[in-house]
Image (cartoon, helix red, strand yellow):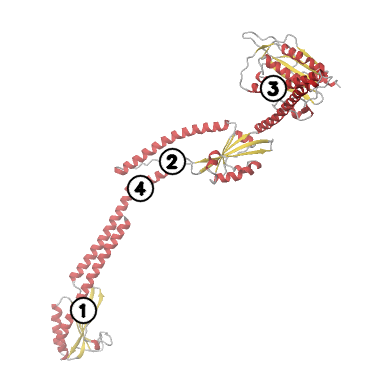
Amino acid sequence: MAAATLVVSLIMSGLTFWAVNTIQQDARMNDTRFGRDLGLLLASNVAPLIAEDNLTEVARFSHRFYSSTSSVRYMIYADEAGQIFFGIPFSESEVQNSLTIQRWIELPEDYAKNSEVPMVRQHLTPDGEVTDVFVPLMQEGKYLGVLAIGINPNPTVVASSNLTRDVTIAVFISIWVMVILGAVFNALMITKPIQELLRGVKNIATGNFKQRIDLPLKGELGELIFSFNEMAERLERYEEQNIEELTAEKAKLETLVSTIADGAVLIDTNFDVVLVNPTARRIFSWEGTDVVGENVLHHLPSAVTMELTRSLYQIAAGQTSAEREREGEEFRITLNEPTPRTVRILLTSVLDQYRESVKGIAMTVQDITREVELNEAKSQFISNVSHELRTPLFNIKSFIETLHEYGEDLSETERREFLETANRETDRLTRLVNDVLDLSRLESCRLYHFEPVDIVQPVEQTLRTYQLNARDKGIELAQDIAPDLPPVLGHYDLLLQVFANLVGNSLKFTEPGGRVMIRAYLLESDPHHHETAQVRVEISDTGIGIDAEDQEAIFDRFFRVENRVHTLEGTGLGLSIVRNIIQKHHSRVHLVSEVGVGTTFWFDLDVFKEKKTPVNQPLKRDSSPSTEATSATVSVP
């Protein structure tokens, strides 16, 4: 508005001054023409008098002319040399003396040559501008001198010009006064509220919803300010609700992330850690280290950094394909510190709500060491089972084909021997299949009904089953069962299978002349650890023993000790079946072994407790595994 006002005022001022200047120019031209005509008229009347040297008549005529013409400022007569000899309103005295001041009109040198044309000029005086007209005095072609007449400007034109100028200046000043007053009013009534509104909008944009504008205004601005305050209040309430919901959702998410079994690391596009859960800290050994806000590449193990760096940069730059962004990139990496293990890492892009730009990268970490070990063990198991199946199947097929083709040529003894061999190999296949089925059934979610079991019965049945086998191998098979043992809570068939597997292993790995012993005795109940009395069962042998490094893995399924034992028959499932059965009884199986001395397996079973029936006072015996077998094996050669 100020710029427009300035332009308009300048245009108006320019037009006004142009008009004033035009008027003045016209007035000056009129004054020039009037002065030239008046000078020529006066010169034609006084030239004959000056030629006759009748200065008195010249003076009289000049006074009458001066008095009758108000526009004449002065009249001056000079001779051909330019010396003034008469003038109005001043004149030379008739008496000449040495103190007389000589006055001259200084004219151009060639003025006398161009004396036919009057010379006109303007000059300023304290009383205003005066038009000077110099008219040559000529008589019969003779140059007599010059007449100078001063013409006052036209007062009407001057007054009009001055009025126009004054009005223009007044209008110019008035316009700017109005502009200044309007600017002040605008600053007080419009600009200030708008600035406050602008400041408030900026604060709202930054998230400060407590911003309010308090200006006592009415009208449209007042309604606008009221609407702004109402909007800010609603936004503040909405933000409080959103903050509560977001806080709750964030807490849920953090709780979920912190409790999942997989490791989770969230990083931004600069690879700075935003979120990390305890599982990831444990896998990457970050316990006690504050990695949040740090570059993840500076804290990952070197093997992980080498594998992930290129993919992380590609994902952050958005250079991955749509399919890879959706499914993620998977890596399997082996870590050697602090303990050897294998991890699976999945990198997934975190996109914005429009799925156009990458906002971060989610890193999911899984410890698949157990899975890798199981896969390796499964492969080993398949290899072992294939070998175990192939050998008896080949033997059965060979002997049956021999009987079929050459049966008539074989003696009765040879035929019986072939049939016995085929029968043994069939039993071997049956045991293998049964072991696999038993382990599968135990690892399923099948529920077993537990009931009171007299531990003496499965022990004696096991001894009867393996007594002949032990006698054939020259091994002593005995029992040491405490008298009056209460029944235990368990499953008879499963416990029988435990005794069969453990005693069978002991007989298998015990040299002739050795000893296998089954013990059972009552443990005292411990109110701090177990409210129910327990029966401890031990199976000891004087066999070859188990290396310390193999004792942790011997209960794993498909596991076979890779030493001289692997030449013996077996699938590596027996002890895994034992462990699963004992776990079904809510207990654990333990072992104590020394290579070349012997091995003791032991486990505890809860005593059956009837409802509303007090538990019998248990016998007082040592709660540690019996060492009788170990001490007995010392004397064995």
Nearer the viewer's eye, disc 2 or disc 1?
A: 2
Gap between marks 2 and 1 measured at Cα: 82 Å
Gap between marks 1 and 3 measured at Cα: 147 Å
Q: Earlier in the sequence, mark 1 or mark 4?
A: 1
Residue shown at the point (82%, 16%) measured from the top left: 471
Is residue 147 shown above or below 10? below
Q: Which of 309 and 32 is in front in this view?
A: 309
Is residue 451 shown above or below 139? above
Q: Which of 368 and 464 is in front in this view?
A: 464
- In this image, 415 relative to 296: left or right? right
> Where does label 3 land, which residue?
435
> Where does label 2 land, which residue?
208
Q: Which of marks 4 and 2 is nearer the N terminus?
A: 4
- In this image, 339 relative to 113: left or right? right
Instruction: Indicate the quadrant containing the N terminus: top left, top right, bottom left or bottom right.
Output: bottom left
- In this image, 192 relative to 500: left or right? left
Residue shown at the point (31%, 41%) measured from the top left: 223
Q: Is residue 475 visible?
A: no
Instruction: Classify mark 2: helix, strand or loop.
Output: loop
* Residue 403, horizontal then vertical, whole percent: 76, 22
Q: What residue type is labelled 3?
A: Asp
Q: Earlier in the sequence, mark 3 or mark 2?
A: 2
CA neighbours of label 1 inside 10 A, class few (<14), some (14 to 19), many (20+):
many
Instruction: Classify mark 3: helix, strand or loop.
Output: helix
> Where does label 4 land, which residue?
192
Residue 150: which numbered mark, if any?
A: 1
Gap between marks 4 and 2 measured at Cα: 21 Å
Q: Is residue 382 visible?
A: yes
CA neighbours of label 3 inside 10 A, class few (<14), some (14 to 19), many (20+):
some
Nearer the viewer's eye, disc 3 or disc 2?
A: 3
